[in-house]
Image: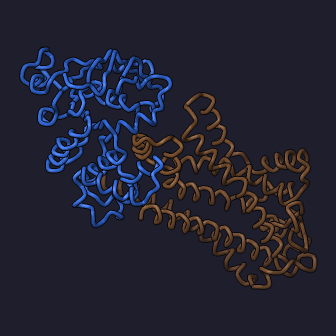
């Protein structure tokens, strides 16, 4: 009996230590960025362009660029991803081909983002002749996000009990009516959450936009989708490794990092809020 | 025998390569309760789900032969399953209300069938809830979530939902197996009322229940229809030894 208790004691403390380590690591990163970055954040920092060889001024073009690119990513990845997930989960039959497709989609979400960057250069920048611009970068990020949105949307659809579908079909509903009125309303909150998390991941990516449209420095925001743009993650990369006076611009780098984290936090928070409201709406 | 609503003729059913129903031939009378009994895995639920083609949703499932409803073989190529399922309603073993309000649950079938008139929907919902003996318990909270109802109430809600589209046949797959005796009794009483308007086919695990509520009883075993007769005859003078063994509890 004592041995069992001892084992439980160690097991429990082992799990607690795992949890503690993770929390500690997260806290250190977050605290470091907040402590060193918060001093830099001001209204001016958020709303003006960089000045004097990017040693002064703000990061507004980068914020606007990231925003625009993420918007294009969403336009591509959200409808396509959800539609694809609905097809795969509701209509596709269980054949070897479909299983292979599904497995490929899962595998694609594990492909390094730089590979998507290369793919984007060849497809959008060169073959489709969009050039390096917001559109090419947004589409590239969209391609990268798709496997993610499809997989998480499919999971959300799988969570809708079969009894809802059977109950609806048994009342004489067609398959599409069943999906539209008795599956999607319950799956959409989960689908959106997964999708938005995918978008926030895309917003923080550097590699795919590196070759497809992000610029080292621009004094203004892009005027059309065919312009180059600055983006927060790429700006951060430049400020922390490529700038000619790295130590001098370190505070700007920290400020950029904090802004990026805050932006991603906001996107994720919006997912949580949206899910909460949709759930409430559906169960009332 | 009385008027036949449904006639199965040499009906076979397969899940992949496994044959689960063998040459079922059976005439199901109109406006009666027909009980189907038999040990687990005998194919009674599969047969029930063949009558509204709900088995179509299972990958690799295949029916062969004929099930004739009002003179038409529902396994014909040109049959629209949606029409069949409107005519043949179903109540599932586990009550499956949708996560909507009580009202919306009952109105669901009407709405998907294109009914838009608010007044007519309200009327039909009230009538269906009354027919399912649930009206008095829910009339003051129609817009509350259906999940707030008790298990027995949820099952009667599912019956009301099935009745709302005015089917002609009602299939019930062990509708009371998860309910307590009081709730079960309510459902059984309800069925006696409903059979005046509907042809009811009920699968049950419980032989006493079959004896109590059904006019005709079919005994299935290993995918075959062993015996089918008036309930009183089947339970008192079964013509086959194996039926007698089953109903006297010698196996099962």
| Quadrant where the C terminus of chain B is found in the figure | top left
Relative to A62, does residue B224 appear above or below in the rendering? above
Which residue is at 33% across, 20% downward?
A: B21
Quadrant assignment, res A64: bottom right
Can residue A214 be spotted in the picture?
Answer: yes
Relative to A103, does residue B68 appear above or below in the rendering? above
Which residue is at 75% across, 77% downward?
A: A255
- Image coordinates for residue A59, horizontal then vertical, percent: 81, 75
Q: How is the image coloured?
A: by chain
Query: Is A168 left, or right, of A273 in this rendering?
Result: left
Q: How many numbered discs?
A: 0
- Image coordinates for residue A241, horizontal then vertical, percent: 84, 66
Query: Is A47 left, or right, of B44 in this rendering?
Result: right
In depth, the one of A169 and A280 nearer the eye is A169
Chain assigned blue: B
In depth, the one of A108 and B119 nearer the eye is B119
In depth, the one of A58 and B111 nearer the eye is B111
Which residue is at 85% across, 81% downward?
A: A57
Q: Residue furthest left?
A: B236
Relative to B80, does residue A271 appear above or below in the rendering? below
Quadrant assignment, res B64: top left
Which colour represents chain A?
A: brown
- Image coordinates for residue B56, horizontal then vertical, percent: 45, 30
| Quadrant where the N terminus of chain B is found in the figure | top left
In depth, the one of A134 and B132 nearer the eye is B132
- Image coordinates for residue A213, horizontal then vertical, percent: 86, 59
Which residue is at 63% across, 32% downward?
A: A100
Can residue A10 be spotted in the picture?
Answer: no
């Amino acid at each position: 009996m004592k041995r069992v208790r001892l084992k439980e004691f160690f097991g429990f403390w082992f799990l607690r230590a795992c949890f503690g380590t993770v929390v500690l690591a997260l806290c250190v990163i977050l605290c470091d960025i907040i402590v060193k970055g918060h001093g830099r954040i001001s209204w001016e920092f958020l709303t003006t362009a960089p000045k004097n060889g990017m040693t002064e001024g703000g990061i507004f073009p980068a914020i606007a660029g990231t925003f625009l690119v993420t918007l294009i990513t969403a336009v591509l990845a959200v409808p396509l991803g959800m539609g694809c997930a609905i097809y795969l989960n509701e209509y596709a039959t269980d054949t070897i081909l479909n299983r292979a497709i599904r497995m490929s989609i899962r595998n694609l979400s594990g492909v390094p983002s730089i590979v998507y960057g290369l793919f984007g250069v060849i497809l959008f920048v060169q073959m489709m002749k969009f050039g390096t611009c917001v559109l090419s970068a947004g589409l590239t990020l969209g391609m990268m996000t798709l496997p993610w949105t499809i997989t998480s949307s499919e999971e959300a659809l799988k969570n809708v009990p079969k009894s809802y579908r059977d109950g609806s079909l048994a009342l004489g509903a067609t398959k599409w009516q069943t999906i539209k009125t008795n599956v999607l309303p319950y799956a959409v909150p989960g689908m959106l959450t997964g999708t938005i998390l995918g978008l926030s991941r895309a917003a923080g990516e550097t590699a795919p936009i590196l070759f497809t449209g992000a610029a080292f420095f621009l004094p203004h925001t892009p005027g059309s989708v065919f312009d180059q743009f600055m983006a927060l993650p790429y700006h951060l990369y430049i400020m922390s490794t490529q700038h000619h006076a790295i130590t001098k611009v370190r505070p700007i780098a920290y400020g950029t990092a904090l802004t990026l984290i805050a932006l991603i936090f906001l996107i994720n928070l919006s997912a949580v809020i949206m899910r909460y409201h949709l759930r409430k709406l559906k169960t009332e | 025998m009385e008027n036949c609503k449904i006639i199965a003729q040499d009906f076979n059913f397969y899940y992949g390569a496994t044959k689960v129903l063998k040459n079922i031939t059976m005439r199901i009378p109109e406006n009666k309760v027909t009980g189907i009994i038999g040990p687990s895995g005998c194919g009674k639920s599969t047969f029930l789900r063949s009558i509204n083609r709900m088995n179509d949703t299972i990958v690799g499932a295949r029916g062969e032969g004929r099930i004739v409803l009002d003179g038409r073989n529902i396994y014909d190529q040109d049959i629209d399953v949606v029409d069949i399922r409107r005519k043949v309603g179903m109540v599932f073993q586990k009550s499956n209300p949708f996560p909507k309000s009580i009202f919306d649950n009952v109105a669901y079938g009407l709405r998907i069938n294109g009914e838009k008139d608010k007044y007519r929907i309200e009327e039909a919902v009230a009538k269906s809830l009354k027919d399912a003996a649930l009206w008095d318990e829910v009339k003051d909270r129609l817009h509350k979530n259906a999940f707030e109802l008790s298990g027995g109430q949820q099952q009667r809600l599912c019956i009301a939902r099935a009745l709302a589209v005015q089917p002609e046949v009602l299939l019930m797959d062990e509708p009371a197996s998860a309910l307590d005796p009081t709730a079960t009794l309510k459902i059984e009483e309800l069925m006696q009322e409903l059979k005046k308007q509907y042809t009811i086919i009920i699968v049950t695990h419980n032989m006493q229940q079959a004896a109590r509520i059904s006019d005709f009883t079919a005994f299935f075993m290993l995918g075959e229809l062993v015996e089918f007769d008036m309930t009183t005859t089947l339970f008192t003078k079964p013509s086959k030894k194996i039926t007698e063994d089953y109903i006297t509890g010698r196996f099962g």
